[in-house]
């Protein structure tokens, strides 16, 4: 064990009083792959931002190779050999790959850019680490998995010894994840030290040497990945046992609540949705699965009235086209949008304002709001859904998981007949995931039809009653026997390697 | 009318009218690339025109005048930087306010210095010299237009070339584009977006300053209130239609210059109500912007 980095007693208190890290410690050995595990809001991202110099600790020290260092900015971190691959890529779409790789450290000859040298070095890095990226391609034209490679190349071009990856597999298919893991192992064998921030238990076990578990801002344990079970890990993370399996009885589908007939959504180049037909019944959870950008989002957006389409889309008996979102919602549709920051919530508003934003119910008199009643209703909803926050708390102060709970509380409290849940648990912690799943299942049992759009394999397989797999705008497989389908098989459908014949 | 269009002086005049618009387009391009819209280019040109006219008159040197015009342009852009980058005001609203401020301050200065006059014709500018290439300028039709022009025409060509090289082949160019396309990416690699935008606005101010100087020190010979009359805005429109490509923006600006000249020059040649002719440049801006927007929309699908 050769310790290269040590963070001791790190405390981070924000100006608004939020305590993100409290006395947290972290240590790294040379040439290991180390996971930082924990729920959302556990403080793992903050701890890593402190390591990368993007945040300053209120208290605590960082030692690099035994020497105390002050990491005052990402620039300093970079100079010290620490690199970070953000979850939200920091790539300039309009610039070619090689300029993105050398962004901020452009090579020059005189005052002009030395393009040839940068292209050559990018190419060499790609070859060395087995990354199939074209240095000349504009970044915007690359698929997500390759954009991630560019981010890694960026870090490598800066000669980083320690590489931090923030939830790198959130956007990848199982096959792409395996490829990434293979490359990360090459990097480790090459002497790099790798930290991945994650809350996916399986990945920690598969990839990592050691795991540091965080809870409520503190480090609660450091374990060897080989020595713990997934169950033990999740107990460490959450603090009490959480069922990884969704508890549900077989579905009893009733009458059709929404259906799509030969729907077409045009796009640039190819059709976003190509002659898609399917229906959702009351009392079932239908999953629209697929790699991002293969039409499943568009199918959901057709049903919520967000985008125009050709063909027919009926929600609760009414054709969507030409109707406002409000009208469709009033029919009994609830929508948990994919992006809670821009569509799901108003970041400027309080929890209460967010909760009442879609519906006042009968809590108005002569056009005025009955604030006391509305407030009671909001407080009830916050309690029912276990949101950590007061009704007057600004929503921007909540962690991702709690924010999503507010969205779910608002949408599911309307006693909907149809729920469109677009990535309802993306970037949400284990506790909140279980909670949201439980709510969806209980609504299903009450006869609500649920359309789930998800890229998370284990969610798709554990929650759905039926799966439609989208590839390039078409449905390539319909899986009714969800229990006996493996992640690998689902992945092959999603990547378009396999295809189920219609009617089979 | 055909004689007029085909005459040697027609092309020369079109270019002469286009020069300030091209400068404005260049100014707009560099600021937009860095992700900040500088609609106070119009006002900056006006202030630069006053500064250039008066300073060249009192110093007796066009070089001093030009230097002051560029400085005035930069100062106006620094006011925008102060409002939009430091005080975080909306750059568009700040730009509008600065344009209003500019028209006021220009009048104030001229009236203050020249005893209540609204133009500086009593204190004529020292003109930026004309350059004439022997032999080449004798080439028929284009010779005079291209090889016998004001010095500022050649500076303008240099500015265009400078922009192309700056944006495509230098580190600053990459920083400017990154600040515009993805500011967070810029910050993530430790390049301050604010710093980059300030630099871009300095360049923008210099270019707007040159455009203003052309009006009062090469074209007319003195400052007159309202002399910019929308040329800054036309430049901004030309840049928008060129979609960020310097040469394309320059060509659109040339087109605007042609229409601008048509509106003025046409009055003596055509039997057409001049009030209507005067609306032509603005109408043209409007129509091309609509065509541009429609084309963009179709492209996006």
Image (spheres, coloured by chain):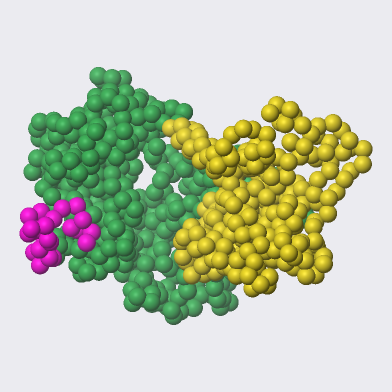
Q: Residue furthest right?
A: B135
Residue A302 screen position, x and y as percent: 28, 35
Q: Quadrant of residue A482?
A: top left
- Residue A355 magenta-drawn? yes
Q: Residue at x 50, y 59 (%)?
A: B96
A276 relative to A171, above or below: above
Give the mark count. Answer: 0
Residue A74 screen position, x and y as percent: 55, 66
Q: Quadrant of residue B209?
A: bottom right
Q: Residue at x 62, y 32 (%)?
A: B271
Chain B rendering hue: yellow
Residue A216 screen position, x and y as percent: 31, 69
- Residue B289 magenta-drawn? no
Residue A416 screen position, x and y as percent: 13, 45
Chain A rendering hue: green
Question: Residue B112 or B132: which is nearer the viewer?
Answer: B112
Q: Residue at x 72, y 53 (%)?
A: B220
Q: Residue at x 43, y 27 (%)?
A: A270
Q: Is residue A321 left or right of residue A142?
A: left
Q: Which residues are magenta?
A: A353-377
A383 relative to A496, above or below: below
């Amino acid at each position: 064990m050769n310790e290269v980095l040590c963070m001791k007693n790190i405390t981070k208190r924000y100006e608004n009083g939020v305590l993100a890290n409290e006395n947290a410690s972290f240590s790294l050995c040379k040439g290991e792959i180390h996971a930082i595990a924990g729920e959302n809001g556990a403080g793992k991202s903050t701890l890593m931002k402190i390591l990368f110099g993007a945040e300053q600790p209120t208290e605590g020290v960082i030692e690099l190779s035994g020497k105390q260092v002050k990491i005052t900015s990402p620039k300093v971190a970079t100079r010290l050999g620490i690199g970070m691959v953000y979850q939200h890529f920091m790539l300039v779409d309009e610039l070619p790959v090689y300029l993105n790789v050398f962004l901020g450290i452009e090579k020059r000859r005189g005052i002009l850019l030395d393009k040839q040298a940068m292209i050559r070095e990018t190419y060499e890095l790609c070859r060395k680490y087995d990354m199939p990226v074209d240095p000349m391609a504009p970044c915007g034209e690359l698929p997500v998995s390759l954009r991630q490679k560019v981010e890694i190349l960026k870090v490598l071009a800066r000669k980083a010894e320690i590489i931090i990856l923030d939830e790198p597999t959130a956007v990848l298919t199982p096959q792409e994840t395996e490829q990434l893991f293979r490359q990360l192992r090459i990097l480790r064998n090459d002497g790099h030290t790798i930290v991945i921030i994650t809350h996916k238990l399986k990945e920690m076990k598969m990839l990592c040497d050691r795991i540091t578990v965080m809870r409520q801002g503190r480090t609660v344990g450091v374990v060897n990945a080989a020595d713990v079970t997934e169950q033990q890990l999740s107990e460490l993370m959450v603090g009490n046992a959480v069922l990884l399996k969704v508890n549900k009885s077989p579905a009893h589908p009733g009458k059709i609540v929404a259906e799509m007939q030969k729907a077409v959504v045009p796009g640039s180049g190819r059709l976003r949705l190509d002659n898609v037909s399917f229906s959702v019944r009351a009392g079932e959870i239908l999953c629209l699965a697929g790699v991002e950008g293969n039409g499943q989002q568009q199918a959901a957006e057709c049903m919520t009235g967000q985008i125009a389409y050709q063909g027919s889309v009926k929600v609760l008996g009414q054709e969507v086209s030409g109707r406002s979102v409000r009208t469709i919602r009033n029919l009994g549709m609830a929508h948990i949008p994919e992006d809670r920051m821009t569509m799901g919530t108003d970041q400027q508003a309080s929890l209460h304002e967010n909760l009442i934003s879609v519906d006042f119910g009968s809590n108005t008199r002569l056009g005025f709001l009955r604030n006391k009643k509305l407030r009671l209703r909001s407080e009830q909803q916050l309690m029912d859904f276990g949101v950590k926050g007061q009704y007057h708390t600004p929503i921007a102060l909540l962690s991702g998981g709690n924010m999503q709970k507010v969205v779910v509380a608002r949408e599911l409290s309307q006693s909907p007949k149809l729920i469109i849940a677009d990535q309802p648990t993306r970037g949400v912690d284990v506790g909140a995931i279980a909670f949201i799943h439980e709510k969806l299942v209980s609504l299903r049992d009450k006869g609500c039809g649920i359309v789930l759009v998800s890229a998370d394999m284990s969610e798709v397989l554990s929650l759905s009653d039926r799966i439609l797999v989208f590839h390039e705008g078409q449905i390539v497989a319909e899986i009714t026997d969800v229990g006996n389908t493996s992640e690998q098989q689902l992945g092959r459908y999603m990547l378009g390697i396999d295809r189920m014949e219609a009617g089979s | 009318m055909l004689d007029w269009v085909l005459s040697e002086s027609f092309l020369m005049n079109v270019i002469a009218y286009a020069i300030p618009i091209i400068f404005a387009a260049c100014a707009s391009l560099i600021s937009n690339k860095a992700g900040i819209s500088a609609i106070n280019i119009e006002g900056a040109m006006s202030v630069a025109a006053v500064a250039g006219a008066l300073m060249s008159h009192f110093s007796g040197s066009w070089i001093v005048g030009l230097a002051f015009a560029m400085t005035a342009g930069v100062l106006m852009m620094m006011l925008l930087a102060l409002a939009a980058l430091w005080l975080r005001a909306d750059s568009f609203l700040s730009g509008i306010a600065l344009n209003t401020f500019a028209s006021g301050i220009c009048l104030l200065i001229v009236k203050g210095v020249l005893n209540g006059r609204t133009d500086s014709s009593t204190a004529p500018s020292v003109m930026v010299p004309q350059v004439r290439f022997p032999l080449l300028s004798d080439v028929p039709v284009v010779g005079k237009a291209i090889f016998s022009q004001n010095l500022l025409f050649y500076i303008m060509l240099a500015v265009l070339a400078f922009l192309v090289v700056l944006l495509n082949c230098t580190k600053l160019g990459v920083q400017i584009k990154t600040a515009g396309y993805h500011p967070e990416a810029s910050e993530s690699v430790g390049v301050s977006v604010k710093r980059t935008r300030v630099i871009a606005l300095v360049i923008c101010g210099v270019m707007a300053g040159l455009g203003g100087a052309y009006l009062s020190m090469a074209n007319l010979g003195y400052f007159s209130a309202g002399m910019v009359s929308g040329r800054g805005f036309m430049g901004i429109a030309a840049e928008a239609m060129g979609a960020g490509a310097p040469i394309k923006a320059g060509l659109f600006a040339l087109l605007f210059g042609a229409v601008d000249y048509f509106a003025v020059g046409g009055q003596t040649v055509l039997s057409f109500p001049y009030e209507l002719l005067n609306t032509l440049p603005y109408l043209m801006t409007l129509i091309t912007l609509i065509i541009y927007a429609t084309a963009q929309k179709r492209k996006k699908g």
